[in-house]
Amino acid sequence: MTTTIDVASIRRDFPILHTRVGGRPLVYLDNAATTQKPVAVLSALEKHYKESNANIHRGVHYLAERATDAYELARKTVAGFLNAARSEEIIFVRGTTEGINLIAQSYGFPFLGEGDEILLTTMEHHANIVPWQLVCERNGAKLRIIPVTDSGELDMEAFTALLSERTKIVSLAHASNALGTVNPVKAMVDKAHACGAIVLLDGAQAVGHFPVDVQDLDCDFYVFSGHKLFSTTGAGVVYGKYDRLQSMPPFQGGGDMINKVTFEKTTYKRPPGRFEAGTPNIGGAVALGAAIEYLGGLDRLALLEYEHDLLQYATGLLSEIEGLKIYGRASEKVSLISFTLEGVHPHDIATVLDADGIAIRAGHHCTQPLHRHYGISATARASFAYYNTREEAEKLTASLKKIKLLFG
Ligand SMILES: *Cc1c(COP(=O)(O)O)cnc(C)c1O
């Protein structure tokens, strides 16, 4: 094993990992649904509310300035994390879902029309399907779907064939929450741009696993949720190229996004302010900044290597279980495994595992079209983070073998 990180020490940073479930140590393998939070994030949140809490941008008093500075510093931290060209390209939203809705409404509604096409993939999360259907219903645009292969990779020939001058936007997951597949997004951005289409990447499952550079990818938009990046719920990010954002109308109207309001006409702030109506999740943004700082203190390439090793190890163990089928065998994957076990419903798997203290997820993982593609309605999914261990993968395997005996 090539562990170059100290997992025992990392685990001490995450208090919840020491929970006991019915007397057994918790084995948390539901990281694709949400990640756990290190003390650094929890204390940043507490410190913010104890020492800096005020509303931002409008006040001139001491606390208002502290809160505004902290919020804007978090924006800079996120910009650095994604290697955005400038911090004005970072918009704080609730999460990936709200981020995609923002782009669908502020870009899709005004710029897409009858006959225009939106390219998605079979493996998209519902959050990257439904907002575009709303655009289609309203504007007469059409969805076209890039199919997946049996191994759970995108069919790149089909992608090339689907691209045309009608394609206005290509919107896809950087990494799939159901298959783990890491898509070849850089090459896809190049091809889409060559056709005049713009590209939105759903980074919800990417940012927590590997470094992302939006300038290198050259994507037009990138979105992610803080809670899948070891921070709190309720704060996420939209990155957009500045000129693109500058051309877009507001998403929601309200306070803090305007220059001047009269009953006849209102003018809007420049990005990012234009897209942040009302009081944002200030504490959530501060916590997200702290989560990024925390990650910055670790060797991210070593974490990636560790997770890759863990994925290989767990895949090997699970593959030995008779009747267990893994969905998602892409050559490049983030550390999650979706599977079915012959004769046992995924919900029963999750329920029995829970009795052993093991947390996984069962269901369609908000990817019903993908499950339909494979002719199944549900899978069980074990999703790992860098704080998980080989021992935990072994416990999962042992419990699954027990289930096999119980139900088989
Ligand atoms: C979790 C997830 C989403 C939705 O994120 P929210 O935080 O629920 O808004 C979208 N896409 C992918 C790939 C996800 O994993």
Image (spheres, rainbow, N blue to C red):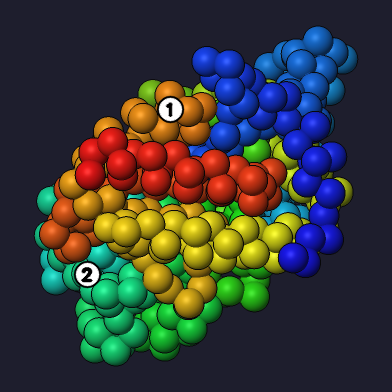
Examine the image and state in which quarter residue 228 appears: top right
- Depth check, front residue: 389 or 377: 389
Which residue appears at 41% of the width and 33% of the height?
353
Farthest residue in the front direction?
405
Q: Is residue 12 visible?
A: yes
Give whichever of discs 1 and 2 has the lower sequence position. Answer: 2
> In the shown orientation, is residue 100 left or right of residue 137?
right
Cα separation, mark 1 vs mark 2, equals 36 Å
Which residue appears at 44% of the width and 57% of the height?
318
Q: Tell me the residue that label 1 is attached to.
A: 354
Which residue appears at 42% of the width and 73% of the height?
330
Q: Is residue 293 above or below residue 111?
A: above
Q: Is residue 311 above or below residue 252?
A: below
Which residue appears at 43% of the width and 24% of the height?
355
Q: Tell me the residue that label 2 is attached to.
A: 145
Q: Quadrant of the N terminus?
A: bottom right
> In the shown orientation, is residue 132 left or right of residue 28?
left
Q: Is residue 281 visible?
A: no
Q: Is residue 190 above or below residue 109?
A: below
Q: Which mark is residue 375?
A: none
Three-letter code, disc 2: Ile
Examine the image and state in which quarter residue 148 appears: bottom left
Secondary structure, mark 1, is helix
